[in-house]
Image (cartoon, rainbow, N blue to C red):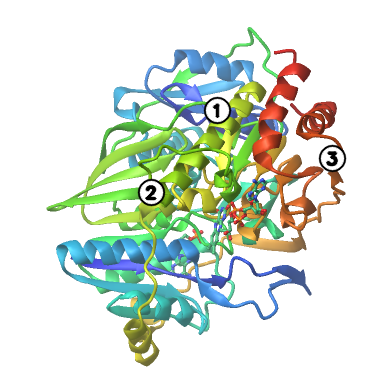
Amino acid sequence: MKLVACVKTTPDTTAAVKVENGKATWGDAPLVINPWDEYAVEAALKLKEANGGNVTVISVGGEEARIALKHALAMGADDAVLISDPALVGVDPQAVAHILTAAIQKLGGVDVAFFGRQAIDDDSGTTPAQAARLLGWPALTLVSVIKVDGRSLRVERAIEEGRQIVTAKLPAVVSLVKDSGEPRYPSFMGIRKASKAEIPTWSLSQIGIPVPAAVIEHVTLINAPVREVVCELITGGNPQEIAEHLAEKILGEKQL
Amino acid sequence: MNTLVYIDNFKGEALPASWEAVGVGKTLGEVTGLIFGSGLEALAKTAFEYGVDEILLADDVSLADYRAEVYATTLKQVCADQGCDVLLFPSTSRGRELAAMAAIDLNTGVLVDAVALEANGDKLTVTRPIYSGKVLEKVTCSLKPQIITLRGRAFPKPAPQPGKTGPVKKVAAGSGALTTVDGYTTSEGGVSLTDANIIVSGGRGMAENPTLQPPADLDAKQAEIWRAQQGFAMLKEMADVLGGAVGASRAAVDAGYVPYAMQVGQTGKLVSPNVYIACGISGAIQHLAGMRSSKMIVAINKDAEAPIFKLARYGVVGDLHQIIPALTVAFKKGLGK
Ligand SMILES: Cc1cc2nc3c(=O)[nH]c(=O)nc-3n(C[C@H](O)[C@H](O)[C@H](O)COP(=O)(O)OP(=O)(O)OC[C@H]3O[C@@H](n4cnc5c(N)ncnc54)[C@H](O)[C@@H]3O)c2cc1C
Ligand SMILES: Nc1ncnc2c1ncn2[C@@H]1O[C@H](COP(=O)(O)O)[C@@H](O)[C@H]1O
């Protein structure tokens, strides 16, 4: 099977992101592979182990995008492609969907394109559905369980009401949620291999598309308002007395 | 402005965020509600009561189950036939996906997860959280229609007006199915986390109750899970008294205490109840990412230094296994139950 996983580099989840001079900054917090994309890579590797084939990881971005690609290679992906172009500054997720689609088409013969549920920087969560629409492939989003049977894929999708069980023919787009399986840690050998890997870079003209127009206009960035709470600790007495006092306070807020 | 609002439903039951979206639509003018599915007369009636002025109804057996491609094609046809300046969706799993696809189909953009909306003439500016709520961005889209998804519980739900009705126009279901739906497995039931007014959440601390004696045939790990499950049963009892839902930290999910569907946080559910009661949860940044927009946070933790207290309005430093049962009793009494 020819499998692709789309990965993005994002600031670490613990990064203290704030706005400075109109831009989001995170000091010297490390950049990492988007945590959701580790699940995408894991799912691709599992499918390869079960059915044979190879896994190519692709990322759209600048030099920083290599971080996610190298992590995926260290986990066991076979190849990586970086799509980078000076014209790509400040592109929005929709433009990325167009670019990833063109790259998947250029790779050719792809059976499944895996995505993370969302990127933890833009928190958009739209790219998988948009790429599927552009490719004309079924969008199997928010997937937690995957089974392949010949040319058909049966998945469980995590929705508000529980799980929806869906079957589709390959090729397909699949986006993963967390309980699809814990991503493996890169092995020592994997890290060595990844550090030596030459990652080819494709420009937009190489994948045959013009610079996608940005459709979203960014007006401003603002720091989230800090929560001005002073915690009132309920103390004194035995657990029953504390509990009664606390219940009284909570009910007094009239939020129930 | 021609405002269309997608009313997300599951088997004829609307998700509450749909009504919030109708409320937002009404601030822009008349609202046309879009209802897709099968057997939806009752839902159409409810939609009018929540303020919808007109309904476009695609009621067809081929739409009985949500399937992205068929729904997206139906939507595309409706927008082409009816015209559309603004298309609003609730940020539910289906709403977000359809909005994303509609942006492709209608050659426009999509602004997801709005928590505030400003109208400047015809142009809408959206405020949306990024970096899991650490930063907010204001964005617009200069193309039409303007497609926006609205984060659940960020906008008020309109008060229903009993008996209000309006015209229902039938529209055709689209084609182009690429999937078949084989069925559903439902979650444990009870109140859904994302819609809940009150959430009682448990973390790793749920297992730390040495006074409980697990059955003798369990090994250490099984005994830990068993203890935690007794603890979560206790949280469920309290949630039931309050009419709320039970959530969990990732540590509790990863340790096998409860299923992933209950996880709150960056890689779990995003919730914003009126009251969030965190029990034996330290308050790691990834947990806070999922619940920081709760109106009031209450923390019960034996460690006075736990970061969760920084966000909490009320806190108890103590053993949750003693406090929770007593608190349940106190709530029962206070609520006259
Ligand atoms: C990429 C990534 C994504 C993540 N996503 C999420 C996410 O979505 N959601 C999430 O929750 N976490 C997430 N995490 C994990 C997060 O970093 C923390 O590890 C996790 O939230 C800790 O859970 P906890 O508070 O239950 O456990 P701990 O941090 O171990 O805290 C347990 C608390 O229980 C208290 N306690 C123990 N016994 C008692 C008692 N008897 N009475 C009262 N208090 C007691 C302790 O004092 C302690 O504060 C993520 C991490 C990463 C790296
Ligand atoms: N720049 C990118 N390069 C590669 N994949 C991406 C990129 N941006 C988003 N993706 C993929 O799309 C998913 C959803 O991203 P988003 O829609 O931006 O939240 C991510 O989890 C990735 O799998």
Label 1 environment density (alpha carbons within 10 Å; few <14, some 14–19, many ≥20): some
Instruction: Determine which residue is flagged by label 3.
Output: A234
Q: Residue at x 39, y 60 (%)?
A: A182
Q: Residue furthest front?
A: B216
A51 vs B283, left or right, is: left
At 30% from the left and 75% from the top, the residue drawn is A77
Nearer to us: label 1 or label 3:
3
Task: Check the image and name the residue furthest to the top.
Answer: B163
Describe the element under mark 1 as helix, strand or loop. Answer: loop
Name the amino acid, label 2.
Asp
Q: Chain of mark 2?
A: B
Left or right position of B299 against A126: right
Q: Is residue A101 visible?
A: no
- For label 2, the SS is loop
Nearer the viewer's eye, disc 1 or disc 2?
A: 2
Q: Nearer the viewer, residue A107 or B4?
A: A107
Q: Which residue is mark 2?
A: B219
Q: How many C-alpha atoms fall within 10 Å of the one at disc 2: few (<14), some, or many (≥20)?
A: few
Vertical position of residue A192 compared to residue B302: above or below: below
The residue where tag 1 is placed is: B191
- What is the x, y in percent for residue B1? 65, 36
